[in-house]
Amino acid sequence: MNISISGMGVITCLGNTTEQIWDALSHNKSGIQEVDLYDVSEARSKMAGQIKEPYSKDGYNRMKEFSKIAIYNAIQDAGLTKKEINENKSILVIGTSLGHMFQNDSKAVMLDDYVPEVLKELDLKIPYISVSTACSSGTDAISMGADFLEFNEFEIVICGGVDVLDIYKTMGHSSLQTLAPSQCIPFSHMEHGTTLGEGAAFIVLQDKKHMTHDKYGIQLIGRSNTTDTISVTNPDINGTGAIRLIQQTCGETGIESIGYINAHGSGTDTNDKMESNVYKQAFCNTKPCISSTKGAFGHTLGATGAIEAVVVILSLLYKEAPPNVGCEIPSKEWDGENLVLNQSKKYTGNGISVTYGFGGTNAALLFQGDKCL
Ligand SMILES: CC(C)(COP(=O)(O)OP(=O)(O)OC[C@H]1O[C@@H](n2cnc3c(N)ncnc32)[C@H](O)[C@@H]1OP(=O)(O)O)[C@@H](O)C(=O)NCCC(=O)NCCSC(=O)CC(=O)O
């Protein structure tokens, strides 16, 4: 089966359309600013990829609003009517890390309790399933969506990730000492650490032979996940599970087909060292372009894999690997690697999005496409 991308919808600190985010990314722009959503005076970092007004400050409503915008835009982009979605076998697969879970101390909050309202307000009468695998959630949601399509369970799959900023995530990462005091610049020789962000991205997957018009000509040709579980917070510095992940994702296509890697690039010392070890070993004969887009969006946790999947799709359409926003001088581990610095680079071949999460969850999506925008 040819798993095709028929539509995409996004909301991020760089904009609410794929055109806006590509324009900002390709001009090396970052959407990271000082947080005004809650009090960050006690936090190690005051900065985040916050989506500014006019959205609700309440986590539940914020999750709902971001999901609704990205899902609605993905459906519109796919040219599907609500009737078509409701009358075919359709499903929503929604990934998040902790979403709005810690927003109300007084009662237990379900991770996906807002989703029925999203569907109702969009007038969609379809089932949904939620996925939470830390920072790989958005990637795993797309992977699971592709499984539903491939095994003929569903015909129209809307899948992606959403996450919101909140004081609990900020203070959690602050006490773990993972936050960069100023701003995350993955793979840079400068200070290390991540910067949080928020947003949502959804894509519509369909079997190419059921589509009347394949406007993007992009296919999801590989997907996989592996688990290390060597530590709750530390990645396996040798990257054994991550290397296996890339090999499994590429399968018979072969890793030499990859022209661009959208890395996890969380900006922390341990993650960035682990990733350089992984790509050095996995791509010893080829040197694909590598960049992380977290310097632009911040680390959007459960949404990051879905947003980065959209970035890879756009990179295939524009035939350019986007910059590693803010990175002028890489750290020495990247000597000899084809790291994209602060300017986009032309590339040919397939694009892969790789995400790693706490608990050792690793996930990847491999896309192919020949059309040009
Ligand atoms: C969290 C770490 C800084 C911990 O490193 P070390 O163990 O070497 O450092 P350390 O012992 O000084 O720990 C720093 C502080 O965090 C606390 N700490 C560490 N691990 C903890 C845990 N499992 N639970 C609670 N607290 C913990 C320590 O007590 C200490 O606080 P105190 O000093 O107060 O005692 C590091 O593992 C790291 O950078 N991890 C992130 C790597 C990364 O970016 N991975 C990408 C995928 S994960 C991702 O993208 C995010 C996600 O999935 O959500």
Image (cartoon, rainbow, N blue to C red):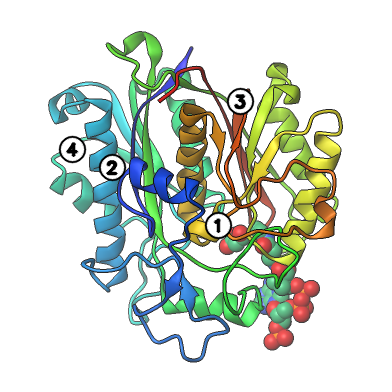
Label 4: state its secondary structure. Answer: loop
Q: Are marks 4 and 1 in contact (CB under 8 Å)?
A: no
Numbered mark located on residue 74 in the image: none
Q: Which residue is mark 1?
A: 294
Label 1: state its secondary structure. Answer: helix
Q: CA distance from mark 4 to mark 1?
A: 32 Å
Along the viewing direction, whichever of 360 and 304 lies nearer the viewer: 304
Say which of marks 3 and 2 sits in front.
3
Residue at the extreme top of the image, as rendered: 209
Instruction: Residue 55 in the image: state x and y as whole percent.
Output: 23, 66
Q: Which residue is mark 2?
A: 71
Residue 144 at least partly seen: no
Along the viewing direction, whichever of 246 and 293 lies nearer the viewer: 293
Q: Quadrant of ligand 1?
A: bottom right
Q: Residue at x 69, y 22 (%)?
A: 257
Instruction: Residue 324 in the image: state x and y as whole percent.
Output: 61, 52
Q: Which residue is mark 3?
A: 350
- N-terminal-most mark, 2 or 1: 2
The disc labelled 3 sits on which kind of residue?
Asn
Displayed quadrant of residue 78: top left
Along the viewing direction, whichever of 49 and 240 lies nearer the viewer: 49
Label 3: state its secondary structure. Answer: strand
Q: CA distance from mark 1 to mark 3?
A: 21 Å
Say which of marks 4 and 1 sits in front.
1
Numbered mark located on residue 124 in the image: 4
